[in-house]
Image (tube, coloured by chain):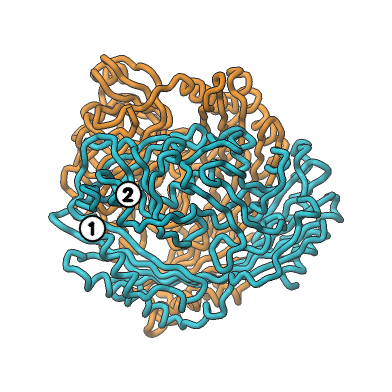
Chain colours: A orange, B cyan
Amino acid sequence: MALADSYFARKFGVTEHDLETYLGEALSQGGDYADLFFEYVATSAVTLDEGIVKSASQGVTLGIGVRVISGERTGYAYSDDLAPERIKHAARTAACIASGPSQVLKHGLMEGEKRNLYPVLTPPTELGLRTKVELVKRADAAARAYDARIFQCTATYADQVKQILVATSDGVVNHDTQPMARLNVSLLARQGNDLPQSGYSGGGGRVSFEFFLNEKTPEHFAREAGRQAIAMLDSVEAPAGEMTVVLGPGWPGVLLHEAVGHGLEADFNRKGVSAFSGRVGQKVASELCTVIDDGTIESRRGSLNLDDEGAPTQRNVLIENGILRGYLQDKLTTRLTGAGSTGSGRREGYQSIPMPRMTNTFMLAGESEPEEVIRSVPKGIYCVNFGGGQVDITNGNFVFSASESYLIEDGKIGRPVRGATLIGNGPEALKYISMVGNDLKLDEGVGICGKEGQSVPVGVGIPTVKIDRMTVGGTA
Amino acid sequence: MKPLELTKEIVRLALELGATDAECTLAEGEEFSVSVRLGDIEKLQEAASRSAGLRVLVGQRSGSAYTSDLSDEGIQRMVRAAVDNAEVTGEDPFAGLPDAADLGQHSADLSLFDEGIASLTTPEKIEQAKRAEAAFLAYDPRIDKSEGASYDSGVSSRYFANSRGFAGGYRSSQCSLSAVPVASQGGAMERDYWYSSARSPRQLDTPENIGIIAAQRTLRRLGARKVATQKAAIVFEPRMARMLLSHIGEAVDGDAVYRDSSFLAGKIGQRIASENVTIIDDGTMPGLWGTSPFDAEGVRTRRTVIVEKGILRSYLLNTYTARKLGLRSTGNAGRGLSGAAYVQNGNFYLEAGSLTPAEVIRQAGTGLYVTEVLGNGVNVVNGDYSCGAQGLWIENGELAYPVSEVTIASTLMEMLNSITAIGNDLEFQSTMAAPTLLIREMTISGT
């Protein structure tokens, strides 16, 4: 696919000559490198609440970001107007970071390789909102039918198609069309006069609309949210203190995202401020642990044909049999440290400077049967669903909040417990993993990762794992 | 076309295309940001942006759209989309614009914009950040790394018009200077930060003070240990007390209340906190971060007593949530650009007490002084509270040694009812503010 096929060439008549002109302006004060990031995002969303479709919304954002790198310095400017004069003004603003003789583009722009990890049958944005309204209505009906104790339900369907075009002064021009869709159900259940308990489920990815009709239906998400809320009606206080923790497969992989993922982003490590800095080649997890960040899995929420700096995404081994293998790189960190690209340069949008980020982060399956893992625990806690998490990458402390967990007593799953935060230290926590299940599962497609004010979609995954020691923040 | 005229024009277009009511928001902003690290510029960013959003009603159905494409074609497309979208939504008897009596704005100057915002040149802004960083790097040899220092500033304008004749706009300025040192000791590293924010650079704290406070905060974390699992007193420093207060803000949000998804739903007139606790929301305090002349629906902002001496007096309400609860809007509508308004606090604060922070710590006797809360393990539906924490251990009423990798847990209801001492150190650095707070007892989970 050539530049001429890109959305920006078709819709705004952007030519190779234009791109070279803008890059030339960006390097007019010197600088080692410059890039352009064109972005157009069309979104739509419908929300059903209290049985009424209360909102239907559509939106468009459009803009271009221009970046100039000079040594360790980055200059950045953007415009939400694609008029050539405005783009040149942004390029000259970003150029101010450098001070030297103007650089000339040494070679013409080359089209990057093309692949398609998200072949979309029906782009969600081409369907009318009425079709999407049906999904949220089905979710609401299924949630209310699930159990009479469910008294509130909100279902939201949201999708977007993002068009990007990246052109770099080292000669790459690449573009991509990135669809995303997601369906969420959140609900409340109550027993008698007790305080309500909540349930939440959702999923999607870079998928066609058909995904919600054939694979993960509104009823699937509604029943899952209902199951959680009803289960929590019988919950008891969560225990407090250090204990054995078993994580269920799938979304609990958020452990990896917080405990190791962020700490392995190369921007922190370049500055030596991560708890994982200088530890490549060292043991940072039990040898049962192999952790991967893979941006190339078809249709996943965290997947990308190319990252937001125009580089193809790839499968990166972060930890192999417990040994730290490498960091996640963006263009700046590869330039400054000489590391190879990992295709991890991502940004929230045209207003944001790219940073090394995760895509889909997961642990490879082990050999234990999940039942055997539970059976091996005399006393502990089994966590199957989490809210979010957070990490202090400098001292390595991370937390993640369990929203659905159960006591384990004498190798058997017991009563559900109230929400509790788990806390650990990144380079230490994974050393206590003593069993890894054979049931690797990726999450359903709801992850949002925040870093320095920028949000990007991500995926996580994990098999059932047993952590011999972790602090559980309950009250009992 | 001038922005306010454009919002009125968009409203007019919407009515022409079949909307029975419409409200349009337009936001403009200019931002500048520079960060320095190890004495040199690391990132410098400068840009301006502008976008608009529209919500329409067709009878009791509503639709929304937004765009950053403000060309004639872009606006036409947005207006058509909003009106079309209303067709697929359901009739909501509570949907609608505010009552005429509530619409309005304060004419007095609320000091949200200070001409001084433009007084610094780019090299001077860079210099401010360099001085803040230099101050923490020089403070102690254990501060051997830097995550830099930043100077950020911006001017933003918000315009709003609706089909009931309201039109208004206001401009605000903000700048901030922040510093992030990293300190090492025995192979372990710690990081913390400090900042100052203001409407203009001359109101900012000096770069040296910001750097030094950041350094002190970082150094006092070194050598942290885990403590045993136990029940003990908890003191929240103001920055963390503010986070606790934000959960109360979520719980009195009319949206959570009418859905019965707040542990404070239905508790007006009841005791929900110790008698020394008074919580106010005031959107009219000049110069502060939660102040505006009107809210996102064109309703005049006001002062509302939320909790008076421990008794819950009011929720935070916009027009929709007020109608759902049979009450009147408290002028607390917020909104991105499009969509229905949500609820947003003004300056939401817990009134100061009379004790100095040191006296509050002394009263605690033994316990944890919390300087950082990690994660969001707070559930306002049932009030459960469980968060990661870092801070300093209190022994014999004095700060003794740093603590990390522990959690603190209780329920918000128990915490509110066991606030036994309140500091006199209330400062408005964001839209929420609270002084040092002592909570009699929470569960600390450690070893």
Task: State whether residue A62 is above or below residue A458.
Answer: below
Task: State whether residue B212 is above or below residue A215.
Answer: below
**Image quadrant assignment for residue A54:** top right
Subunit under mark 2: B
Q: Residue at x 48, y 40 (%)?
A: B273
Task: State whether residue A84 is above or below residue A375.
Answer: below
Task: Say whether disc 2 or disc 1 marks the residue closer to the N-terminus.
Answer: 1
Residue B121: x and y in percent read 46, 83
Q: Quadrant of the C terminus of chain B?
A: top left
Residue B17: x and y in percent read 84, 53
Residue type at numbered disc 2: Val
Q: Would residue B300 appear left or right of A433 to someone viewing this image?
A: right
Q: Would residue A460 appear left or right of A191 to someone viewing this image?
A: left
The tag on residue A146 is: none
- Tag 1 residue: B220
- Tag 2 residue: B370
Subunit under mark 1: B
Residue A387: x and y in percent read 43, 37
Residue type at numbered disc 1: Arg
Residue B308: x and y in percent read 55, 47
- Nearer to me, B212 or A1: B212
**Image quadrant assignment for residue B139:** bottom left
Q: Residue at x 36, y 49 (%)?
A: B236
Badge 2 element: strand
Q: How many marks?
A: 2
Q: CA distance from mark 2 to mark 1?
A: 12 Å
